[in-house]
Image (cartoon, rainbow, N blue to C red):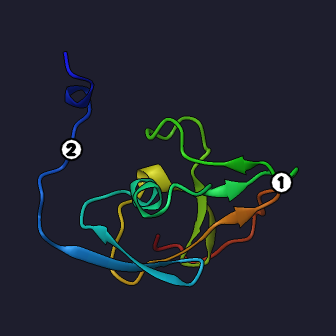
Amino acid sequence: MKIASRFLTLPETGRIVYLTIDGEPVTARAGDTVAAALLAHSGNPSRHSATGAPRTVFCMMGVCFECLIEIDGRPNCQGCMIRVRDGMALRRQVGLRSFAQGPADV
């Protein structure tokens, strides 16, 4: 069994989604999750822990919470559970999670 055959890939739609990561304009494929877009963009950490340790997506299924990211001003969103959309503003979180509320439409 080939390793690549273990992973489900979405069919190519040809549609590109425009978003920002920490203010930097990037593109992603329509249908990708925020976590997948982060990994495809740079592979850089998606957040930093309270001690400054870099953290990034791990399970890609909503269990580990390593993919927490601020989406459109709302902190602590699980990037692996949310699909990208045009105009989305992503910001990597640094330090302890806050419990501030943002827009409820994420």
Residue 82 in the image, given as x and y percentages of width and height? 41, 58
Q: Position of residue 48 (x, y in %)?
A: 74, 55
Q: Quadrant of residue 34?
A: bottom left
Q: Residue at the far right: name it.
A: 51
Q: How packed is label 2: few (under 14 Cα within 10 Å), some, or many (20 or more)?
A: few
Q: Which mark is residue 9?
A: 2
Instruction: Write the residue at 47% across / 60% down.
Output: 38
Alpha carbon of mark 2 to alpha carbon of mark 1: how far?
A: 33 Å
**Is disc 1 surrounded by few (<14), some (14 to 19) or many (20+) residues within 10 Å?**
few
Q: Tell me the element at label 2.
A: loop
Q: Is residue 5 left or right of residue 98?
A: left
Q: Amino acid at mark 2?
A: Thr
Give the residue at the far top of this rendering. Answer: 1
Residue closer to the observer: 44 or 80: 44
Instruction: Tell me if 36 is positioned left or right of 54 in this view.
Output: left
Residue at image point 57% right, 50% down: 67
Q: Position of residue 42 (x, y in %)?
A: 49, 61
What quarter of the picture does the N terminus occupy? top left
| Sequence-wise first label, 2 or 1 | 2
Which percent across, then down, holds residue 66? 62, 45
Q: Vertically, is 14 above or below 82?
A: below
**Identity of the residue drawn at 33% across and 80% down:** 86
Q: Is residue 18 left or right of residue 21?
A: left
* Amino acid type of the residue tagged 1 in the rendering: Gly
> In this figure, which residue is indicated by the disc labeled 1?
52
User: Which structural element holds mark 1?
Assistant: loop
Which residue is painted at 58% across and 57% down in the image? 44
> Any mark on residue 33, and which?
none
In the rendered image, the vertical position of residue 12 relative to residue 17, given as above or below: above
